[in-house]
Image: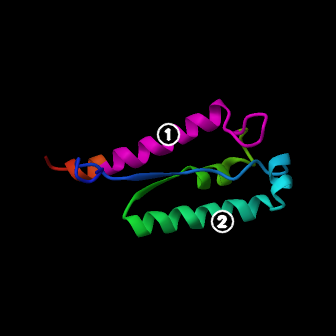
């Protein structure tokens, strides 16, 4: 239905829980394990479905050591994390749109 409407599907690849968070401890996995597993799953789904991917999880992984991106629960984004997610989505969608409209 998305393609029939002239659009491209975009997967919103989310982030691993905050490093050292109680949620990770409860799951019994490390931050890297969760981040790598989510990255692989989202990218496989994008390949299998010919979808674009807004890799918010990778951006969180790369920036979380330098920036506070998580809310107090260690699972959800704070305002900065939400802004990063929105920027990643917009970037992917605008790049796709521009690629379809270059020279028109």
Pointer 2 residue: 37
4 is higher (above) or lower (below) than 68: below
Residue sitting nearer the eye, 64 or 78: 78
Question: Overall secondary structure of the magenta stretch?
Answer: helix
Residue shown at 35%/44% (left/top)?
Answer: 94
Camera-side mark, 1 or 2: 2
Q: Position of residue 29 (x, y in %)?
A: 80, 62
Colouring of the image: rainbow
Q: Position of residue 66 (x, y in %)?
A: 73, 45
Pointer 1 residue: 87
Residue shown at 77%/42% (left/top)?
Answer: 74
Residue sitting nearer the eye, 40 or 64: 40
Stretch in magenta: 69-96
Q: Is residue 75 magenta?
A: yes
Looking at the rendered structure, the secondary structure element under dot 2 is helix
Tell me if label 1 and label 2 are in contact, CB under 8 Å.
Answer: no
């Amino acid at each position: 239905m998305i393609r029939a409407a002239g659009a491209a599907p975009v997967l919103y690849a989310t982030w691993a829980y905050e490093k050292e968070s109680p949620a990770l401890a409860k799951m019994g996995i490390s931050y890297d394990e969760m981040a790598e597993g989510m990255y692989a799953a989202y990218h496989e789904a994008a390949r299998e479905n010919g979808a674009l991917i807004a890799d918010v999880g990778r951006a969180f992984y790369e920036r979380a050591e330098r920036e506070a991106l998580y809310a107090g629960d260690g699972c959800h984004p704070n305002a900065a994390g939400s802004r990063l997610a929105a920027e990643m989505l917009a970037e992917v969608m605008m790049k796709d749109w521009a690629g379809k409209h270059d020279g028109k």
